[in-house]
Amino acid sequence: MIPLVDLEAQYLQIKEEIDEIIRDVVNSRSFIQGRYVTAFETEFARLQQCDHVVGCSNGTSALFLALLAAGIKAGDEVITTPATFIATAEAICHVGAVPVFVDIDPATYTIDPSLIESRITSKTRAILPVHLYGNPADMDSIMALARAHDLRVIEDCAQAHLATYNTRPVGTFGDAGAFSFYPGKNLGAYGDAGAVITGDPDRAKMMRLLADHGRDSKYIHTIIGYNHRMDGLQGGILLVKLKYLQRWTEQRRSNAQRYSSLLHDVEGLQLPFSRELSEHVYHLYVVQVPNRDTVISYLQENGVSASIHYPIPLHLQPALKFLGYREGDFPVAEHAARHIVSLPMYPELTPEQIERVCSLLVTAVKNEG
Ligand SMILES: Cc1ncc(COP(=O)(O)O)c(C=O)c1O
């Protein structure tokens, strides 16, 4: 079986270091925050080229903390994309704001900036682009709109560790960038974890307070906060894995190149597109095919795991029905949701495995299976 993600292969490469750090965390009983989380924050700041990193409990809480610290509150509107994981919209709802969807660019699957302006109202406070699949959104256009309309920008970087736009890492354009370290992400913990990055020290301080019961010092709580702290085991594991992130990212890119070179002339197949200014980090390698369900079944029957990220755009999710959207509102996102397939993608994927996936895919797309 060729899995979609192979977390065991990754663990086996770094088993000794991981086992040792787990022992260290337990021996030092740094279970909540503590020195491993602090060391991780420092190192992640260096790699992401930002001033402040606030480790937290997961990517959803990272978005929530970023929105709260940006002053987004009940009744505000936040413009975002329907082509993302539900957490993007959940975080907006959790601060009491209203997600306002804008369709995506058909080549990159990221929010289409040319459609944003017409959705700006007197209630709009922020834009929340998602660097989906590891592909940076069009940050020049988004930042220009935000400046023109005095809007905050929170970047959802859950799938885009180390991705860059115009040589600058994602998460450093807006007011804050939210990362997830869910186990299958490009940088994955062994449980839930996340982080927010920002260039603003006051914002970082506010997010730290919010994530830790509003605690300024051990027994002084200056605001009513939450418990969204990162735990020590995750901090330690992420610290070990950070050393390899650059190499793993290069391996993902080279695997993507191999896929694309084998698939570029297959009729009916749409391959991932990376803007000239962007460095895509291929959290997922997503293609569009005319006959999606047949393709997925054929791949599965032949020992290849393939998946869909995501089959239902957010505006059609039952949980968001109250927003009042309908089928047909975002034709590009809806078309993509019907045709996308995520192929196996992880650093340890071998050239032979990629060749096998491609040859099965080509047969399935041509309906010769
Ligand atoms: C685009 C996107 N945003 C937010 C999240 C939320 O992250 P988490 O699962 O760590 O809460 C995820 C991942 O699951 C994601 O893919």
Image (spheres, rainbow, N blue to C red):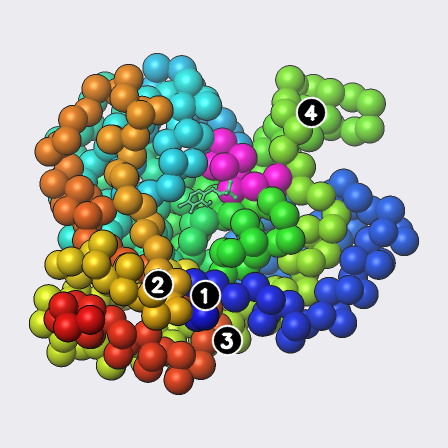
Which amino acid type is shown beneath numbered disc 1?
Pro
Q: Nearer the viewer, mark 2 or mark 1?
A: 2
Q: Are marks 4 and 3 in contact (CB under 8 Å)?
A: no
Q: Are marks 2 and 3 in contact (CB under 8 Å)?
A: no
Residue found at the far bottom of this picture: 352
User: Which dot marks residue 3?
Assistant: 1
What's the residue at 73%, 65% (across, down)? 18
Q: Which residues are magenta?
A: 56-64
Neighbor class of circle 2 (other Cα within 10 Å; few <14, some 14-19, many 20+) is some
Q: Nearer the viewer, mark 3 or mark 1?
A: 1
Image coords of residue 235 (percent x, y): 69, 52
Sooner in the amino-acid sequence: mark 4 or mark 2: 4
Circle 4 — which element?
A: loop
Residue tagged 4: 213
Quadrant in the picture for the C terminus: bottom left
User: Which dot marks residue 300?
Assistant: 2
Circle 2 — which element?
A: helix
Q: Nearer the viewer, residue 334 or 153?
A: 334
Question: For the residues marked 4 and 2, what is the alpha-carbon distance in whole angstroms?
Answer: 46 Å
Image coords of residue 328 (percent x, y): 11, 33
As drawn, is 309 to the left or to the right of 57?
left
Residue tagged 3: 348
Quadrant in the picture for the N terminus: bottom left
